[in-house]
Image (tube, helix red, strand yellow):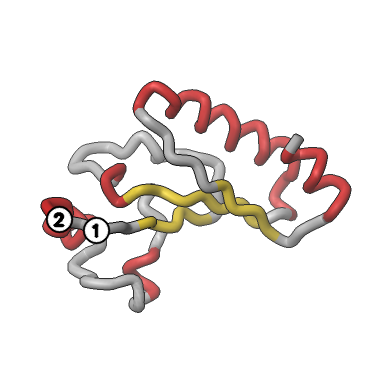
Amino acid sequence: MIGEMVRFTHPPGLQIDFEAPKAARPFYRELLSALRARTGSDVWLSMTALVSWCGTGRSWMAGLPVDEIGPVAFYMGGLRTRWLRCSGGAASFSSPDAAAVWA
């Protein structure tokens, strides 16, 4: 359905906002791969990612066929330290470096 909408409307970009619990991550990966295959490289493909998805090891988001991964933050609580580590020390999203692709 998303691919059909893109085909008819010809948007310059598309952002997918999906909170994927661990069990849904394979579906999310498949969805993004199918969208990329359907839209090609002509459509900027972006996704949102919860800050908590930024792990210390290889991220499950590595290798996703997207042009951008935009971090989504909420009350950080105990995750603040993890965010600072993953963002290279950026304390907010005001810095372009803080919103860099994590994958």
Q: Hey, what amino acid is under mark 1?
A: Tyr
Rendered-image quadrant of the N terminus: top right
Kindly indicate the quadrant of the structure image that contains residue 11. bottom right
- Indicate whether 89 appears above or below 27: below
For this rendering, which residue is in front, 64 or 10? 10
Residue 56: x and y in percent read: 18, 42
Query: Label for residue 77?
Result: 2
92 with respect to 47 (left or right): left
- Disc 1, SS: loop
For this rendering, which residue is in front, 38 or 47? 47
28 with respect to 93 (left or right): right
Residue 100: x and y in percent read: 39, 63
- Indicate whether 53 appears above or below 11: above
Q: Residue lying furthest front in this view?
A: 75
- Disc 2, SS: helix
Q: Residue lying furthest bottom in this view?
A: 94
90 with respect to 71 (left or right): left
Give the Cα separation between the discs numbered 1 and 2.
Answer: 6 Å
Query: Label for residue 90?
Result: none
Residue 12: x and y in percent read: 73, 61
Within 10 angstroms of label 2, few (less than 14), some, or many (20 or more) residues?
Answer: few
Find out whether the residues at labels 1 and 2 contact each other: C-beta distance under 8 Å.
Answer: yes
At horizontal 43% and vertical 40% (from top left) the residue drawn is 19
At horizontal 38% and vertical 65% (from top left) the residue drawn is 99
Within 10 angstroms of label 1, few (less than 14), some, or many (20 or more) residues?
Answer: few
Query: Label for residue 75?
Result: 1
At horizontal 52% and vertical 47% (from top left) the residue drawn is 17
At horizontal 42% and vertical 34% (from top left) the residue drawn is 20
43 with respect to 71 (left or right): right
Residue 75: x and y in percent read: 24, 58
Q: Hey, what amino acid is under mark 2?
A: Gly
Kindly indicate the quadrant of the structure image that contains residue 61. top left
